[in-house]
Image (cartoon, grey):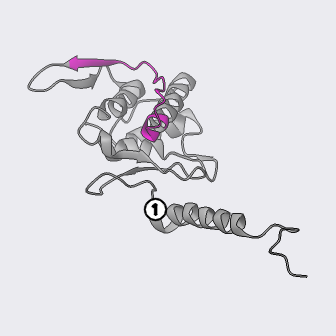
Amino acid sequence: MQASAESVRDFVNTYDVEADADDLGTPAELALWLRERALAGPGDRATDDDLTLAVALREGLRAAMRRDGERPELPVLPLRVTVGRRPELAPVGGGVAAGLAMIAAAVTGDSWDRLKVCAEATCRRAFIDSSRNRSRSWCSMRVCGNRTKTRAYRARKQGSRPRPGSNTDTV
């Protein structure tokens, strides 16, 4: 099974920044998450080291999707390069580490430039930018875009109020 852009998005979203909730809180939850997406076999078990690797990969991908010029360090994963019509990355071996490697390999696909994280600082959910010019900033204009724009509007309004003691005060 190959991981897709959707898999990368879903993996990054296993940690909800706003709610401070982690779907991968234990090695068993990590193994289950990978199995449910056919990225690990039914007998594959995760260890504490696998969980540490998964969290480092997830947060490294989230940082890379911000595209703010920072170059996050991603963990080393067991991958091999297959050169054909076009080079591809494939996991070496099996198990949980190979499932994580499949997620990491998916970022080399054509859809990487469409994977982003929400610009709203309290959100940071990953999303796939399907806009024609790839200019989307928020996971949801209705929620996060509205929050950001409302905050900016209120800040502008506060800044335009006359200060007490200025010559615009009435006597």
Name the image quarter holding residue 140. bottom left
Does residue 69 appear to the left or right of 110 in the view shown?
right
Q: Residue at x 64, y 64 (%)?
A: 156
Farthest residue, direction bottom: 171
Q: Quadrant of residue 139?
A: bottom left
Other residues around mark 1 within 10 Å, as few (<14) / some (14–19) / many (≥20): some
The image position of residue 15, as x and y in percent, is 55, 44
Where does label 1 land, which residue? 140
For the stretch drawn in magenta, the main secondary structure is: loop
Q: Residue at the location (59% across, 39% down)? A: 25
Towards the viewer: 111 or 81: 111
Q: Is residue 37 left or right of residue 137?
A: left
Quarter of the image with the C terminus is bottom right
Quadrant placement of the N terminus: top left
Residue beneath the point at 67% across and 69% down: 157
Kindly tell me whether residue 87 is visible in this rendering.
yes
User: Residue 59 location in percent, x, y?
Assistant: 52, 34
Locate residue 28, reporting x and y percent.
Answer: 53, 36
Q: Is residue 18 magenta?
A: no
Query: Which span of residues is magenta-colored?
Result: 63-81
Q: Which residue is at 23% across, 18% downward?
A: 81
